[in-house]
Image (cartoon, rainbow, N blue to C red):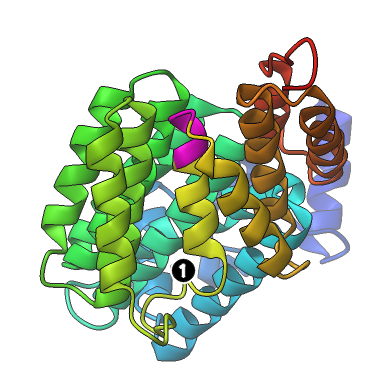
Amino acid sequence: MTETSLKTKLSRWENGHEAVGLPEYRRLFREVYGRTNAELGFPDDHTPGPADELRARLAIARTVDAATVAAFRSQIEQTRRIDRQFGGLTQLDQLRRHVPTVQSLLTHGPAAGHRAALAAALTEASTLAGWQALDRDDHTQAWQHYERAKHAAREAESPLLLAHATAEQTVVLTAIDEPAHAAEQAAHARSLAEHGPALLRAWLAAMHGEALAAAGDRDSALRAFDTAHAVLPAEPVDPALPFVFLGGAHLDRWRGNALALLGEREAIDQLASALTRLPPVWVRAHTGLLVDLAYAHAAAGDRDAALTHARDARRLAQQIHSDRQLRRLARLTLPTGRP
Protein backbone atom coordinates (compact mmCIF):
# COMPACT_ATOMS: atom_id res chain seq x y z
CA MET A 1 0.00 0.00 0.00
CA THR A 2 1.32 3.49 -0.84
CA GLU A 3 1.69 6.11 1.90
CA THR A 4 -1.35 8.05 0.67
CA SER A 5 -3.45 4.90 0.47
CA LEU A 6 -2.31 3.82 3.91
CA LYS A 7 -3.38 7.19 5.42
CA THR A 8 -6.80 6.81 3.84
CA LYS A 9 -7.09 3.25 5.10
CA LEU A 10 -6.03 4.21 8.62
CA SER A 11 -8.69 6.91 8.71
CA ARG A 12 -11.40 4.51 7.59
CA TRP A 13 -10.24 1.78 9.97
CA GLU A 14 -10.02 4.06 13.02
CA ASN A 15 -13.37 5.68 12.33
CA GLY A 16 -15.03 2.31 11.98
CA HIS A 17 -15.99 2.79 8.33
CA GLU A 18 -14.13 -0.34 7.24
CA ALA A 19 -12.98 -3.50 8.99
CA VAL A 20 -9.31 -4.43 9.08
CA GLY A 21 -9.52 -7.39 6.72
CA LEU A 22 -6.06 -8.81 6.13
CA PRO A 23 -4.37 -10.72 8.98
CA GLU A 24 -1.10 -8.91 8.20
CA TYR A 25 -2.62 -5.49 9.01
CA ARG A 26 -4.32 -6.83 12.15
CA ARG A 27 -0.91 -8.09 13.28
CA LEU A 28 0.56 -4.59 12.81
CA PHE A 29 -2.26 -3.04 14.86
CA ARG A 30 -1.61 -5.55 17.67
CA GLU A 31 2.09 -4.66 17.66
CA VAL A 32 1.52 -0.87 17.55
CA TYR A 33 -1.14 -0.77 20.28
CA GLY A 34 0.03 -3.78 22.29
CA ARG A 35 -3.50 -5.17 22.31
CA THR A 36 -5.11 -8.53 21.52
CA ASN A 37 -7.54 -9.24 18.69
CA ALA A 38 -10.41 -9.34 21.20
CA GLU A 39 -9.41 -5.95 22.68
CA LEU A 40 -9.19 -4.39 19.22
CA GLY A 41 -12.48 -5.94 18.09
CA PHE A 42 -10.78 -8.12 15.47
CA PRO A 43 -11.83 -11.69 14.64
CA ASP A 44 -9.57 -14.55 15.69
CA ASP A 45 -6.80 -15.17 13.15
CA HIS A 46 -6.51 -18.82 14.08
CA THR A 47 -6.36 -21.07 11.00
CA PRO A 48 -7.67 -24.60 11.58
CA GLY A 49 -4.84 -27.12 11.52
CA PRO A 50 -4.67 -30.92 11.28
CA ALA A 51 -5.36 -31.32 14.99
CA ASP A 52 -8.51 -29.17 14.70
CA GLU A 53 -9.76 -31.28 11.78
CA LEU A 54 -9.14 -34.48 13.73
CA ARG A 55 -11.00 -33.08 16.75
CA ALA A 56 -13.92 -32.16 14.50
CA ARG A 57 -14.07 -35.66 12.99
CA LEU A 58 -13.91 -37.24 16.44
CA ALA A 59 -16.70 -34.97 17.67
CA ILE A 60 -18.93 -35.91 14.72
CA ALA A 61 -18.24 -39.64 15.18
CA ARG A 62 -19.25 -39.38 18.85
CA THR A 63 -22.74 -38.29 17.77
CA VAL A 64 -23.45 -41.68 16.12
CA ASP A 65 -26.39 -43.37 17.80
CA ALA A 66 -28.80 -46.22 17.07
CA ALA A 67 -30.90 -43.96 14.83
CA THR A 68 -27.84 -43.07 12.75
CA VAL A 69 -26.98 -46.73 12.19
CA ALA A 70 -30.63 -47.52 11.36
CA ALA A 71 -30.62 -44.72 8.77
CA PHE A 72 -27.50 -46.11 7.13
CA ARG A 73 -28.96 -49.62 7.02
CA SER A 74 -32.20 -48.28 5.55
CA GLN A 75 -30.22 -46.59 2.75
CA ILE A 76 -28.38 -49.83 2.05
CA GLU A 77 -31.61 -51.82 1.87
CA GLN A 78 -33.18 -49.29 -0.48
CA THR A 79 -30.10 -49.44 -2.71
CA ARG A 80 -30.31 -53.25 -2.68
CA ARG A 81 -33.95 -53.21 -3.85
CA ILE A 82 -33.30 -50.68 -6.60
CA ASP A 83 -30.22 -52.58 -7.77
CA ARG A 84 -31.95 -55.91 -8.34
CA GLN A 85 -34.72 -54.27 -10.37
CA PHE A 86 -32.99 -51.44 -12.24
CA GLY A 87 -29.29 -52.27 -12.07
CA GLY A 88 -26.41 -50.57 -10.33
CA LEU A 89 -25.34 -47.85 -12.79
CA THR A 90 -26.38 -44.94 -10.56
CA GLN A 91 -26.49 -46.94 -7.33
CA LEU A 92 -22.77 -47.70 -7.47
CA ASP A 93 -21.94 -43.99 -7.58
CA GLN A 94 -24.18 -43.39 -4.57
CA LEU A 95 -22.49 -46.19 -2.66
CA ARG A 96 -19.08 -44.74 -3.51
CA ARG A 97 -20.16 -41.59 -1.67
CA HIS A 98 -21.96 -43.46 1.10
CA VAL A 99 -19.19 -45.91 2.03
CA PRO A 100 -16.47 -43.30 2.84
CA THR A 101 -18.89 -41.52 5.19
CA VAL A 102 -19.53 -44.69 7.19
CA GLN A 103 -15.81 -45.55 7.01
CA SER A 104 -14.86 -42.14 8.48
CA LEU A 105 -17.37 -42.45 11.31
CA LEU A 106 -16.04 -45.90 12.13
CA THR A 107 -12.41 -44.77 11.94
CA HIS A 108 -12.98 -41.86 14.32
CA GLY A 109 -15.65 -43.41 16.53
CA PRO A 110 -15.15 -44.36 20.19
CA ALA A 111 -14.17 -47.89 21.15
CA ALA A 112 -17.54 -48.48 22.78
CA GLY A 113 -21.01 -47.36 21.76
CA HIS A 114 -22.35 -48.34 18.34
CA ARG A 115 -19.02 -49.26 16.74
CA ALA A 116 -19.90 -52.90 16.02
CA ALA A 117 -23.26 -51.98 14.47
CA LEU A 118 -21.59 -49.31 12.33
CA ALA A 119 -18.96 -51.82 11.18
CA ALA A 120 -21.73 -54.26 10.24
CA ALA A 121 -23.43 -51.55 8.17
CA LEU A 122 -20.12 -50.82 6.44
CA THR A 123 -19.74 -54.52 5.65
CA GLU A 124 -23.15 -54.68 3.97
CA ALA A 125 -22.57 -51.46 2.03
CA SER A 126 -19.15 -52.67 0.84
CA THR A 127 -20.35 -56.12 -0.26
CA LEU A 128 -23.18 -54.49 -2.21
CA ALA A 129 -20.73 -52.07 -3.81
CA GLY A 130 -18.48 -55.01 -4.66
CA TRP A 131 -21.34 -56.84 -6.37
CA GLN A 132 -22.27 -53.76 -8.37
CA ALA A 133 -18.67 -53.14 -9.42
CA LEU A 134 -18.46 -56.78 -10.52
CA ASP A 135 -21.59 -56.32 -12.62
CA ARG A 136 -19.85 -53.38 -14.30
CA ASP A 137 -16.94 -55.76 -15.02
CA ASP A 138 -14.56 -53.74 -12.81
CA HIS A 139 -12.82 -56.64 -11.09
CA THR A 140 -10.17 -54.58 -9.32
CA GLN A 141 -12.68 -52.23 -7.75
CA ALA A 142 -14.92 -55.15 -6.78
CA TRP A 143 -12.01 -56.90 -5.07
CA GLN A 144 -11.17 -53.75 -3.08
CA HIS A 145 -14.77 -53.37 -1.93
CA TYR A 146 -14.83 -56.98 -0.72
CA GLU A 147 -11.52 -56.51 1.11
CA ARG A 148 -13.01 -53.51 2.93
CA ALA A 149 -16.10 -55.58 3.70
CA LYS A 150 -14.01 -58.37 5.24
CA HIS A 151 -12.03 -55.89 7.34
CA ALA A 152 -15.25 -54.27 8.58
CA ALA A 153 -16.77 -57.69 9.37
CA ARG A 154 -13.77 -58.47 11.57
CA GLU A 155 -14.23 -55.09 13.28
CA ALA A 156 -17.88 -56.02 13.86
CA GLU A 157 -16.69 -59.38 15.25
CA SER A 158 -19.22 -61.10 13.00
CA PRO A 159 -18.11 -64.45 11.49
CA LEU A 160 -21.39 -64.55 9.57
CA LEU A 161 -20.74 -61.26 7.78
CA LEU A 162 -17.14 -62.29 7.19
CA ALA A 163 -18.28 -65.60 5.66
CA HIS A 164 -20.71 -63.79 3.36
CA ALA A 165 -18.16 -61.24 2.14
CA THR A 166 -15.49 -63.93 1.69
CA ALA A 167 -17.86 -66.10 -0.35
CA GLU A 168 -19.08 -63.27 -2.57
CA GLN A 169 -15.49 -62.36 -3.36
CA THR A 170 -15.04 -65.78 -4.96
CA VAL A 171 -17.17 -64.58 -7.90
CA VAL A 172 -14.37 -62.14 -8.74
CA LEU A 173 -11.89 -65.03 -8.80
CA THR A 174 -14.16 -67.02 -11.12
CA ALA A 175 -14.62 -63.98 -13.38
CA ILE A 176 -10.85 -63.63 -13.85
CA ASP A 177 -10.46 -67.35 -14.61
CA GLU A 178 -9.20 -68.46 -11.20
CA PRO A 179 -11.86 -71.12 -10.46
CA ALA A 180 -9.61 -73.39 -8.37
CA HIS A 181 -8.78 -70.50 -6.02
CA ALA A 182 -12.47 -69.52 -5.99
CA ALA A 183 -13.46 -73.03 -4.86
CA GLU A 184 -10.79 -73.00 -2.15
CA GLN A 185 -11.96 -69.63 -0.83
CA ALA A 186 -15.62 -70.69 -0.94
CA ALA A 187 -14.76 -73.75 1.16
CA HIS A 188 -13.05 -71.46 3.68
CA ALA A 189 -16.13 -69.22 3.78
CA ARG A 190 -18.28 -72.25 4.63
CA SER A 191 -15.97 -73.13 7.51
CA LEU A 192 -16.37 -69.64 8.96
CA ALA A 193 -20.12 -70.15 9.38
CA GLU A 194 -20.37 -73.88 10.01
CA HIS A 195 -22.45 -73.18 13.12
CA GLY A 196 -24.37 -70.27 11.60
CA PRO A 197 -28.04 -69.99 10.56
CA ALA A 198 -29.29 -72.67 8.18
CA LEU A 199 -30.17 -70.08 5.53
CA LEU A 200 -26.61 -68.75 5.41
CA ARG A 201 -25.13 -72.27 5.38
CA ALA A 202 -27.37 -73.17 2.42
CA TRP A 203 -26.29 -70.03 0.57
CA LEU A 204 -22.62 -70.69 1.24
CA ALA A 205 -22.98 -74.29 0.04
CA ALA A 206 -24.54 -73.05 -3.22
CA MET A 207 -21.75 -70.50 -3.65
CA HIS A 208 -19.22 -73.30 -3.15
CA GLY A 209 -21.10 -75.43 -5.66
CA GLU A 210 -20.95 -72.71 -8.28
CA ALA A 211 -17.19 -72.30 -7.79
CA LEU A 212 -16.67 -76.08 -8.00
CA ALA A 213 -18.71 -76.20 -11.20
CA ALA A 214 -16.58 -73.44 -12.72
CA ALA A 215 -13.53 -75.52 -11.76
CA GLY A 216 -15.04 -78.54 -13.55
CA ASP A 217 -15.49 -80.66 -10.41
CA ARG A 218 -18.93 -82.05 -11.28
CA ASP A 219 -19.48 -84.49 -8.44
CA SER A 220 -18.36 -82.10 -5.69
CA ALA A 221 -20.42 -79.29 -7.19
CA LEU A 222 -23.61 -81.35 -7.25
CA ARG A 223 -22.98 -82.57 -3.69
CA ALA A 224 -22.65 -78.97 -2.55
CA PHE A 225 -26.00 -78.10 -4.14
CA ASP A 226 -27.60 -81.18 -2.61
CA THR A 227 -26.38 -79.93 0.76
CA ALA A 228 -27.81 -76.48 0.05
CA HIS A 229 -31.24 -77.95 -0.73
CA ALA A 230 -31.12 -80.18 2.35
CA VAL A 231 -30.11 -77.36 4.70
CA LEU A 232 -32.43 -74.69 3.27
CA PRO A 233 -35.13 -73.93 5.85
CA ALA A 234 -38.81 -74.17 4.91
CA GLU A 235 -39.10 -70.40 5.45
CA PRO A 236 -35.96 -69.09 3.70
CA VAL A 237 -36.16 -65.56 5.11
CA ASP A 238 -34.08 -64.22 7.98
CA PRO A 239 -34.30 -60.53 9.03
CA ALA A 240 -30.71 -60.81 10.30
CA LEU A 241 -29.59 -61.80 6.78
CA PRO A 242 -31.29 -59.28 4.45
CA PHE A 243 -28.61 -59.89 1.80
CA VAL A 244 -29.36 -63.63 1.38
CA PHE A 245 -32.06 -64.69 -1.11
CA LEU A 246 -32.72 -68.39 -1.65
CA GLY A 247 -36.51 -68.62 -1.57
CA GLY A 248 -38.73 -69.46 -4.53
CA ALA A 249 -36.73 -70.13 -7.69
CA HIS A 250 -33.40 -68.67 -6.56
CA LEU A 251 -31.64 -71.85 -5.43
CA ASP A 252 -32.98 -73.75 -8.46
CA ARG A 253 -31.71 -71.16 -10.91
CA TRP A 254 -28.36 -71.22 -9.14
CA ARG A 255 -28.12 -75.00 -9.53
CA GLY A 256 -29.16 -74.57 -13.15
CA ASN A 257 -26.28 -72.15 -13.63
CA ALA A 258 -23.86 -74.74 -12.25
CA LEU A 259 -25.30 -77.45 -14.52
CA ALA A 260 -24.86 -75.12 -17.50
CA LEU A 261 -21.24 -74.50 -16.50
CA LEU A 262 -20.74 -78.26 -16.44
CA GLY A 263 -22.39 -78.68 -19.85
CA GLU A 264 -25.18 -80.88 -18.45
CA ARG A 265 -28.29 -81.15 -20.62
CA GLU A 266 -30.40 -81.23 -17.43
CA ALA A 267 -29.55 -77.52 -17.08
CA ILE A 268 -32.18 -76.56 -19.68
CA ASP A 269 -35.13 -78.00 -17.76
CA GLN A 270 -33.80 -76.68 -14.44
CA LEU A 271 -33.34 -73.14 -15.77
CA ALA A 272 -36.59 -73.10 -17.76
CA SER A 273 -38.54 -74.11 -14.66
CA ALA A 274 -36.83 -71.44 -12.56
CA LEU A 275 -37.56 -68.81 -15.23
CA THR A 276 -41.32 -69.36 -14.99
CA ARG A 277 -41.22 -68.98 -11.18
CA LEU A 278 -38.90 -65.99 -10.86
CA PRO A 279 -40.83 -62.78 -10.00
CA PRO A 280 -40.51 -60.06 -12.70
CA VAL A 281 -39.08 -57.60 -10.17
CA TRP A 282 -35.82 -59.59 -10.16
CA VAL A 283 -34.60 -58.12 -13.44
CA ARG A 284 -30.90 -58.70 -12.75
CA ALA A 285 -31.56 -62.35 -11.88
CA HIS A 286 -33.73 -62.73 -15.00
CA THR A 287 -30.86 -61.45 -17.12
CA GLY A 288 -28.34 -63.92 -15.75
CA LEU A 289 -30.82 -66.77 -16.04
CA LEU A 290 -31.48 -66.01 -19.70
CA VAL A 291 -27.75 -65.93 -20.40
CA ASP A 292 -27.44 -69.32 -18.70
CA LEU A 293 -30.26 -70.67 -20.87
CA ALA A 294 -28.56 -69.35 -24.00
CA TYR A 295 -25.37 -71.20 -23.04
CA ALA A 296 -27.26 -74.37 -22.14
CA HIS A 297 -29.14 -74.47 -25.47
CA ALA A 298 -25.93 -73.68 -27.36
CA ALA A 299 -24.22 -76.61 -25.61
CA ALA A 300 -27.17 -78.82 -26.61
CA GLY A 301 -26.83 -77.69 -30.25
CA ASP A 302 -30.15 -75.77 -30.41
CA ARG A 303 -29.16 -72.60 -32.28
CA ASP A 304 -32.66 -71.09 -32.47
CA ALA A 305 -33.37 -71.42 -28.74
CA ALA A 306 -29.91 -70.13 -27.87
CA LEU A 307 -30.43 -67.09 -30.12
CA THR A 308 -33.85 -66.35 -28.65
CA HIS A 309 -32.62 -66.38 -25.06
CA ALA A 310 -29.46 -64.45 -25.99
CA ARG A 311 -31.51 -61.68 -27.61
CA ASP A 312 -33.81 -61.40 -24.59
CA ALA A 313 -30.83 -61.42 -22.25
CA ARG A 314 -29.02 -58.73 -24.25
CA ARG A 315 -32.06 -56.46 -24.14
CA LEU A 316 -32.28 -56.75 -20.35
CA ALA A 317 -28.50 -56.46 -19.88
CA GLN A 318 -28.48 -53.22 -21.86
CA GLN A 319 -31.47 -51.98 -19.87
CA ILE A 320 -29.73 -52.45 -16.51
CA HIS A 321 -26.22 -51.70 -17.89
CA SER A 322 -24.82 -55.10 -16.90
CA ASP A 323 -21.39 -55.18 -18.55
CA ARG A 324 -20.74 -58.57 -16.97
CA GLN A 325 -23.68 -60.25 -18.71
CA LEU A 326 -22.96 -58.45 -21.98
CA ARG A 327 -19.41 -59.82 -21.84
CA ARG A 328 -20.78 -63.34 -21.27
CA LEU A 329 -23.06 -62.94 -24.28
CA ALA A 330 -20.16 -61.72 -26.41
CA ARG A 331 -18.34 -64.98 -25.61
CA LEU A 332 -21.30 -67.19 -26.53
CA THR A 333 -20.53 -69.56 -29.42
CA LEU A 334 -23.66 -70.58 -31.32
CA PRO A 335 -23.99 -74.01 -32.91
CA THR A 336 -24.44 -74.28 -36.66
CA GLY A 337 -27.93 -75.79 -36.57
CA ARG A 338 -30.61 -77.62 -34.58
CA PRO A 339 -29.79 -80.93 -32.80
**Numbered disc 1: secondary structure:** loop
**Residue 328 % position (x, y):** 65, 25
Q: Nearer the viewer, residue 165 or 7?
A: 165
Q: Mark 1 is on which residue type? A: Leu
Q: Which of 168 and 183 lies nearest the eye of the viewer?
A: 183
Residue found at x 49% / y 52%: 254
Quadrant (top left/top right/bottom left/bottom right) for the N terminus = top right
> Which residue occupies the extreme front position in the image?
339
Q: Is residue 166 visible?
A: no
Q: How far from the left and from the top, in percent, is residue 19?
A: 78, 59
- On the rendered structure, is 221 left or right of 125? left
Above or below residue 60? Residue 95 is above
Residue at mark 1: 246
Between residue 98 and residue 201, name the one nearer to us: 201
Identity of the residue furthest to the top in this view: 336
Tell me the residue at 19%/34% (across/down).
Answer: 184
Give the main secondary structure, helix, strand or loop, of the magenta stretch. helix
Give the position of the C terminus as an image quadrant: top right
| Residue at horizontal 64 percent and vertical 60 percent from the top | 273
Residue 237 is at least partly visible in this image: yes
Q: Label 1: how many residues lie within 10 Å, few (<14), some (14-19) or many (20+)?
A: many
User: Which residue shows up at 65% across the image and 47% down it?
Assistant: 289
Q: Is residue 134 magenta?
A: no
Q: Is residue 216 left or right of residue 326?
A: left
Residues drawn in magenta: 259-263
Name the residue nearer the viewer: 60 or 51.
60
Q: Is residue 199 above or below residue 203?
A: below
The image quadrant that residue 85 belongs to is bottom right
**Residue 157 occupies which quadrant of the picture?**
bottom left
Image location (x, y in percent) of residue 308: 86, 35
**Residue 162 vertical placement versus 264 (above, below):** below
